[in-house]
Amino acid sequence: MLLLIIFIFILVGIVWLLIEYIQSASLNAFLDEKIMHRFLWLWLPFYALWRLSREMIFKDKPAKEK
């Protein structure tokens, strides 16, 4: 039963993406307006955390003067 619900959920998602793609002007507009803007909040925090950790761990240390 759970697999059927998961399958239906995935099928509805694919149909939704197909309808959104048909309604958009082009593939580029579809990816930009529909996908990137709606899912930006998902990947942006992970990218920001990766970037922050990279800058904090691998930052250049000033040379010591003698």
Image (tube, rainbow, N blue to C red):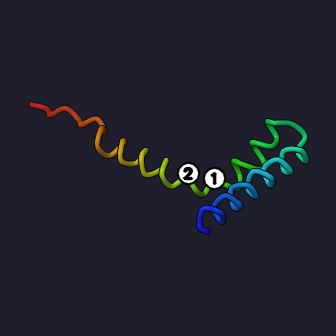
Where, by quadrant of the figure, is residue 31 drawn? top right
Residue 40 image label? 1
Provide residue 65's location: percent of width, then percent of height: 13, 32
Q: Residue at x 36, y 42 (%)?
A: 54
Provide residue 63's location: percent of width, then percent of height: 19, 32
CB atoms of marks 1 and 2 within 8 Å: yes
The foreground one among 18 and 66 is 18
Q: Which quarter shows the N terminus?
A: bottom right
Q: What residue does disc 2 label?
A: 43
Where, by quadrant of the figure, is residue 26 drawn? top right
Secondary element type, mark 1: helix
Q: Which quarter shows the C terminus?
A: top left
Where, by quadrant of the figure, is residue 38 drawn? bottom right
Total numbered circles: 2
Instruction: Name the residue furthest front.
Output: 1
The foreground one among 54 and 5 is 5
Residue 10 image label? none
Provide residue 58's location: percent of width, then percent of height: 30, 38
Q: Amino acid at mark 1?
A: Leu
